[in-house]
Image (cartoon, rainbow, N blue to C red):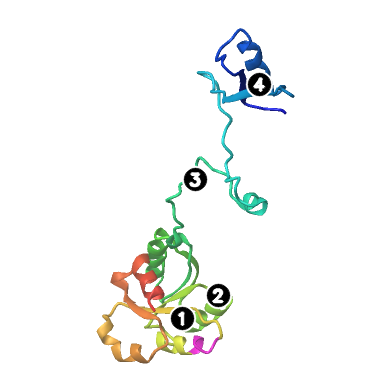
């Protein structure tokens, strides 16, 4: 019989003269064929280092243990993915360079990536189909095609990006045409922010 981690003590002799010898042998795991001994657990000495516990539950099957992630002391269990930080690409269409520059500054500061600019409807169609942005910020008043006409052309494409129309005028000026348009929504130029644009695009 081999006993590891236990001390064998003769009956009736709690700590006889052989105690150190039996204690040493028991801890070495070398006691064999010793009949009529009483087993008592050995307590760890003060200051000794106990055996570290496994990082995964050993009661799990081997396959489950191998699949269990290792502990990461730097991981925050309460941390969640911030999906709002995903970069969106946008095409800005307006016949005024000053507004295109202002819109670029506002949207890039709010986490958007401006992949192109267009100054008229024809360029908007080419840019949307070539650059394939996540959305198009489209001015209604353009020198050739207006924004509603550009929306109608892009709506024929299989993977047309969502379009948000914009103007210096209030939405009340276009309410009837907006109701018939394929545009995702409208935002006044004075109200343009990244959050407002994202809210329109994400609105079901």
Q: Is residue 158 left or right of residue 146?
A: right
Q: CA distance from mark 3 to mark 1?
A: 50 Å
* Residue pictured at 46% horizontal, 90% vertical: 152
Residue linked to disc 1: 120
Q: Earlier in the sequence, mark 3 or mark 1?
A: 3
Residue linked to disc 2: 132
Q: Earlier in the sequence, mark 2 or mark 3?
A: 3
**Residue 51: x, y in percent?**
58, 30
Q: Quadrant of the N terminus?
A: top right
* SS majority, magenta: loop
Q: Are marks 4 and 3 in contact (CB under 8 Å)?
A: no
Q: Nearer the viewer, mark 2 or mark 4?
A: 4
* Residue pictured at 50% horizontal, 41% vertical: 74
Residue linked to disc 3: 75
Q: Nearer the viewer, mark 2 or mark 1?
A: 2
**Toward the viewer: 105 or 119?**
105
What numbered label is drawn on residue 26?
4
**Which stretch is magenta?**
153-157
Q: Tag 1, which secondary structure?
A: loop
Q: CA distance from mark 2 to mark 3?
A: 37 Å
């Amino acid at each position: 019989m081999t006993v590891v981690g236990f001390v064998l003590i003769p009956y009736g002799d709690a700590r006889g003269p052989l105690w150190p010898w039996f204690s040493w042998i028991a801890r070495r795991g070398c006691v064999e064929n010793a009949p009529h001994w009483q087993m008592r657990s050995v307590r760890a000495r003060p200051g000794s280092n106990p055996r570290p516990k496994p990082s995964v539950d050993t009661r799990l099957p081997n396959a489950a243990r191998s699949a269990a992630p290792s502990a990461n002391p730097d991981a925050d269990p309460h941390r969640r993915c911030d999906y709002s930080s995903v970069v969106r690409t946008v095409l800005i269409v307006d016949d005024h360079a000053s507004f295109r520059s202002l819109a670029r500054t506002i949207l890039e500061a709010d986490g958007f990536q401006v992949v192109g600019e267009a100054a008229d409807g024809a360029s908007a169609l080419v840019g949307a189909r070539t650059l394939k942005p996540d959305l198009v910020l489209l001015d209604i008043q353009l020198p050739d095609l207006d924004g509603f006409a550009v929306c109608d052309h892009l709506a024929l494409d299989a993977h047309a990006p969502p379009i948000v129309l914009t103007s210096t005028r209030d939405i009340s000026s276009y309410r009837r045409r907006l109701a018939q348009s394929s545009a995702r929504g409208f935002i006044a130029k004075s109200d343009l922010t990244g959050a407002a644009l994202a809210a329109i695009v994400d609105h079901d």
